[in-house]
């Protein structure tokens, strides 16, 4: 059964100078325990779709639903905090917090006691393959691959069932890219999460269980 669905979704950007139909009648479904790759050229609507799935905005028409409930009818702040997590290409770590503190932050924000948050954060950092020596390091002291792993650990801190990744390997070399993809695939296949990633890399997309191809805001292929 699908945990996250998009049905006849349309979204338009309007500026003073132009109107861009970013998504046009997009329908798709996502299940737990599966990894999905959304691919397409720049401007095809990939990031717009991911933003709507994350509840950062609402469709102009159509609907996004999580476990059957429309995002338009839910508390989207709570949805983003507890149901879905997003990993970005640029990491978005807090520069003045250590790796451990970055992962603890969303848990403390939701009311978890510091001692419990610290224990879980350590476990999450080990889960993504980082040694204890990284716990007290600040982002500027880490490699790109290490920062992305911290970002994934932070995303997992909410125990969200859906993990959305926007070009998670875009700033990494090939070895670190594969390491990150391996982690994401394990989260889907071994922990039963739904992993949805945007990528321009066909080799990475080919490792996903399903591929959704977008062109000019419309789905042109799904496998």
Image: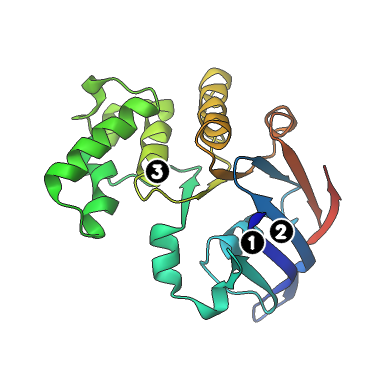
Number of the front mark, 2 or 3: 3
Mark 1 to mark 2 CA distance (whole Å): 5 Å
Disc nearer the start of the sequence (1/3): 1
Residue occupying the far right of the picture: 220
Task: Identify the residue at image location x=22%, y=29%.
Answer: 135
Q: Is residue 89 left or right of residue 64?
A: left
Checking the image for residue 58, the label placed there is none
Say how many tags the image has.
3
Residue tagged 2 = 45
Are dots 1 and 2 in contact, CB under 8 Å?
A: yes
Residue occupying the far front of the picture: 1
Q: Quadrant of residue 75?
A: bottom left
Task: Identify the residue at image location x=52%, y=66%.
Answer: 55
Counting from the top left corner in percent of width and height, residue 69 is at 57, 72
Task: Identify the residue at image location x=58%, y=63%.
Answer: 67
Counting from the top left corner in percent of width and height, residue 77 is at 40, 69
Which element type, helix, strand or loop, lies under badge 3? helix
């Amino acid at each position: 059964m699908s945990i996250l669905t998009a049905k006849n979704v349309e979204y338009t950007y309007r500026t003073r100078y132009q109107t861009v139909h970013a998504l046009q009648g997009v329908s798709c479904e996502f299940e737990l325990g599966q990894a999905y790759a959304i691919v397409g050229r720049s401007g095809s609507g990939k990031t717009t779709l991911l933003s709507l799935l994350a509840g950062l905005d609402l469709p102009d028409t159509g609907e996004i639903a999580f476990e059957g409930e429309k995002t338009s009818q839910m508390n989207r702040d709570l949805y983003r905090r507890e149901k879905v997590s997003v990993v970005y290409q640029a990491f978005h770590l807090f520069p003045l917090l250590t790796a451990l503190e970055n992962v603890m932050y969303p848990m403390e924000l939701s009311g978890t006691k510091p001692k419990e948050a610290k224990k879980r954060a350590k476990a999450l950092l080990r889960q993504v393959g980082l040694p204890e020596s990284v716990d007290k390091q600040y982002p500027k002291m880490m490699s790109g691959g290490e920062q992305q792993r911290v970002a994934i650990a932070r995303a997992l801190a909410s125990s969200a069932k859906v993990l959305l990744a926007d070009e998670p390997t875009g700033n990494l070399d090939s070895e670190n890219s594969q390491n990150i993809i391996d982690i994401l695939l394990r989260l889907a296949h071994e922990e039963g999460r739904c992993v949805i990633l945007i990528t321009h890399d066909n080799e990475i997309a080919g490792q996903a269980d399903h591929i959704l191809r977008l062109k000019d805001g419309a789905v042109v292929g799904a496998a």
